[in-house]
Image (tube, grey):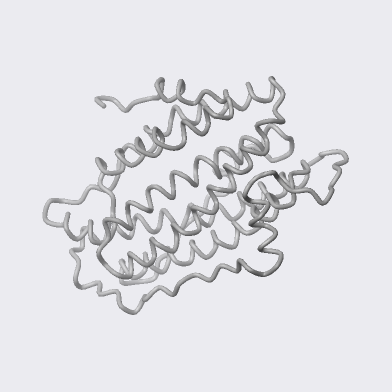
Amino acid sequence: MSFGTVEVRRSKSKTALARHHDRALRGELARVSKPIPWEDFERERYAEPALALARDLFTKLAMGEYSAVGLFAQITAGLAFTGAPLDIVAASTRVGSDEIRHAEYCLRMAELCAGEPVSVLIEHEAIAANVPAATNQANVDFLVFKYAAIGETLAAALLTECRRRATDPVLKALFGSLVADEVHHARLGWYYAAYRAPLFTLPERQELADRVAEFVMGIEEEFWLGRDAPVSARGAAKALGVLDSDTQRRVIADVMEGEILGALDEVGLGASLAWRARRRPAGA
């Protein structure tokens, strides 16, 4: 990894994150997660098909959250080595600790749903193959836009809907805890976008626009299928916060069209054009 020489000065982004950073330095913003009443979960209340879907949801979440620990470590290194403002680098360092806590929470919930210990396999080589190294400014820009701004906004929207649907108190508390952190992670991405947008050269903006467009075009296809329970278990699946396909598609469309596309267009990436050309599953 080679970045040459980077000048680091006591500067901050001209965004609300700078004020947040100052408060954090004064010890005013220590986030303490609300306790989750794990012992109150009553597995026997729910049909096995619904529990199986919930277990699948939480094992997949655990895999994603655990993988994000390394991803955001790489993003943080890239931000530091490209001389990003201190408040942005500091906010990025906090993401990893949130993600490892999320991974543990999700594994614990998967075990409660399964009624037995659960483990997941993380294929680091497959993940690394799809993540460009944060070794230059263009890659750092893309990683923050893709995984923090867009990715965490999508995650927050989906988990918010899970929380809204869930009636089980343990699941409701768990989803609430996850959402509270994902919102902070998404804000990091958008604050970075506000900081970087005025600094883009035309070639940098065009390269990022092309890379973001390719990602945006595949989002609906990636999230097309939710977890559809058999008729007899739909009520139980909903109580556990599991999203069926129709609901998941609606949430993705709503957050893309109501939040993400406009924000990307505002910084000159033309994402709305990419969304209109998005890939659709056969028969959609």
**Quarter where residue 111 is shown:** bottom left
Please state if 118 lies on the left or on the right of 74 as rendered. Answer: left
Q: Residue at x 28, y 54 (%)?
A: 242
**Quarter where residue 45 is shown:** bottom left
| Quarter that holds the N terminus | top right
Q: Residue at x 58, y 29 (%)?
A: 267
**Quarter where residue 281 is shown:** top left
| Quarter that holds the C terminus | top left
Please state if 109 lies on the left or on the right of 124 as rendered. Answer: left
Q: Nearer the viewer, residue 131 or 29?
A: 29
Q: Nearer the viewer, residue 153 or 77?
A: 153
Please tell me whether residue 116 is drawn above or below residue 183 in the rendered image.
below
Q: Can you give x and y, in whole percent of width and height, for residue 232 in the image? A: 11, 56
Q: Can you give x and y, in whole percent of width and height, for residue 14 in the image? A: 69, 44
Q: Residue at x 20, y 51 (%)?
A: 229
Q: Can you give x and y, in whole percent of width and height, for residue 266 in the image? A: 54, 29
Please identify the residue farthest to the left as the structure is shown.
232
